[in-house]
């Protein structure tokens, strides 16, 4: 098997697994306990918090540990709007967000908030002018993702933040896909809140973090004891947090090296396919794209049909077949990609452990499959996808 689905999840870094091991039995205690057992856990939490803060370039006190990207997004959006609803009830987001933002917004609509879903251009980016026009006097929050999970499109966050701040709105970004792949510096981006997910950067699943700038007031969405400044009550998941910390440490130290490697692998993959199959198309733009993500369209093919021809390659369909009908990713639809092109779209995402041998073999298998004739073309509907 060749794993080219690193945007869905990444394997746990061996260094993170090694660091976690003692906390699976040998070292234990409740970080809230004042005795030595508890204090060793508190120390481990502090170390991990510093490692996460180093990756994001913020203070450890600005990091709230959560169960992952979904929970970080929920806490940011629900927590901020509940705490600040007297300031206004308008929220701005984009059409290409992950369901962990879109479905939170749908919920907030039921609680009396008004949401604007901004469109994107052909490169998959929200244009600053689009945001400027959407801002209203009652806009309190703008949430636009840092990099898209399907196309890898990197958003012009600094410019968007500037517009939001000039209009007294707070800015949150979902950086689940960008952390570990490109520089994520909250000082440079000037964001007020940022979500990250451990399992997208070689940390454990079920663990993530939310950066919250010191001036931001949040309402807790879970109720319990006072852990994580009362914003995430419940005894901390120390073993996973230790793994997340080590994953962030590696991501910080090897950012350039990883970035270059991801780019080398995905460029080679694309070149090999393009040479043999010139009709292949990249969905999105080469500029401002995550170095590891290739969302490729194979005209005439249904994505699932092509994936079935290459069972050795693990990648994701940009459209998926549900009950006999093809469905198109709303992200590709938002890019204005024609239905036929979207139907044959596959997301390949490389990672730190991808080898050039794997790239060559995966390309060879796909090229061989493309020499066959596609079997069918089903009817197409738009529906929700893009969940990883
Ligand atoms: C952009 C984005 N945000 C949020 C999430 C959800 O993260 P988690 O799986 O850690 O809840 C994902 C995961 O696919 C994602 O790609």
Image: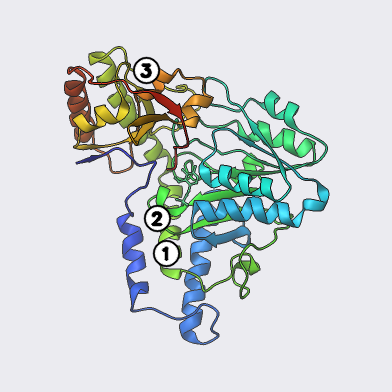
Q: Nearer the viewer, mark 3 or mark 2?
A: 3
Residue carrying label 1 = 240
Mark 1 crowdedness (10 Å alpha carbons): few <14, some 14-19, many ≥20: many
In front: 279, or 194?
Answer: 279
Q: What secondary structure is marked by label 2?
A: loop
Residue carrying label 3 = 281
At horizontal 68% and vertical 45% (from top left) the residue drawn is 109
Q: What secondary structure is marked by label 3?
A: strand
In the image, residue 65 sits, relative to residue 283, either above or below, namely below
Estimate the x, y position of residue 145 in percent, counting from the top left.
56, 39
- Does 320 sit left or right of 137 as displayed? left
Asked whether the viewer can see residue 192, the reply is: no
Estimate the x, y position of residue 337 in percent, counting from the top left.
47, 19
| Quadrant in which residue 226 is drawn | bottom right
The quadrant of the picture occupied by the N terminus is top left
For marks 2 and 1, the one nearer the N-term is 2
Estimate the x, y position of residue 365 in percent, counting from the top left.
18, 27
In the image, residue 39 sits, relative to residue 276, either above or below, namely below
- Does 305 sit left or right of 65 as displayed? left
Residue at far top of view: 278
């Amino acid at each position: 098997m060749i794993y080219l689905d690193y945007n869905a999840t990444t394997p746990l870094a061996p260094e993170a697994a090694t660091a976690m091991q003692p906390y699976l039995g040998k070292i234990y205690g409740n970080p809230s306990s004042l005795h030595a057992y508890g204090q060793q856990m508190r120390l481990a939490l502090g170390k991990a918090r510093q490692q996460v803060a180093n990756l994001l370039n913020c203070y450890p006190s600005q990091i709230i540990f959560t169960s992952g990207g979904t929970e970080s997004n929920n806490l940011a959006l629900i927590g901020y709007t509940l705490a600040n609803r007297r300031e206004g009830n308008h929220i701005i987001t984009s059409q290409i967000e992950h369901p962990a933002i879109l479905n939170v917004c749908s919920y907030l609509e039921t609680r009396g908030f008004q949401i604007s879903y901004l469109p994107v251009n052909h490169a998959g980016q929200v244009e600053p002018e689009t945001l400027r026009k959407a801002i209203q006097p009652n806009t309190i929050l703008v949430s636009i993702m840092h990099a898209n999970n399907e196309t890898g499109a990197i958003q012009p966050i600094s410019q968007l933040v500037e517009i939001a701040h000039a209009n007294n709105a707070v800015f949150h970004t979902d950086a689940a896909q960008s952390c570990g792949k490109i520089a994520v510096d909250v000082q440079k981006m000037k964001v007020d809140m940022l979500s990250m997910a451990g399992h997208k950067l070689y940390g454990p699943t079920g663990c993530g973090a939310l950066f919250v700038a010191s001036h931001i007031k949040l309402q807790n969405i879970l109720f319990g004891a006072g852990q994580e400044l009362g914003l995430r009550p419940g005894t901390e998941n120390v073993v996973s947090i230790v793994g997340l910390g080590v994953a962030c440490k590696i991501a910080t130290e090897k950012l350039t090296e990883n970035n270059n490697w991801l780019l080398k692998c995905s460029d080679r993959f694309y070149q090999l396919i393009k040479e043999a199959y010139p009709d292949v198309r990249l969905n999105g733009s080469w500029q401002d794209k995550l170095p590891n993500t290739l969302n490729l369209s194979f005209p005439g093919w249904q994505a699932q049909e092509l994936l079935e021809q290459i069972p050795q390659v693990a990648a994701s369909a940009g459209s998926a077949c549900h009950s006999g009908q093809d469905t198109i990713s709303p992200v590709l639809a938002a890019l204005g990609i024609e239905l036929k092109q979207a139907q044959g779209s596959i997301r390949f995402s490389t990672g730190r452990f991808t080898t050039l041998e794997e790239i060559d073999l995966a390309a060879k298998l796909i090229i061989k499959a493309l020499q066959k004739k596609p079997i069918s073309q089903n009817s197409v509907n738009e529906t929700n996808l893009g969940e990883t």
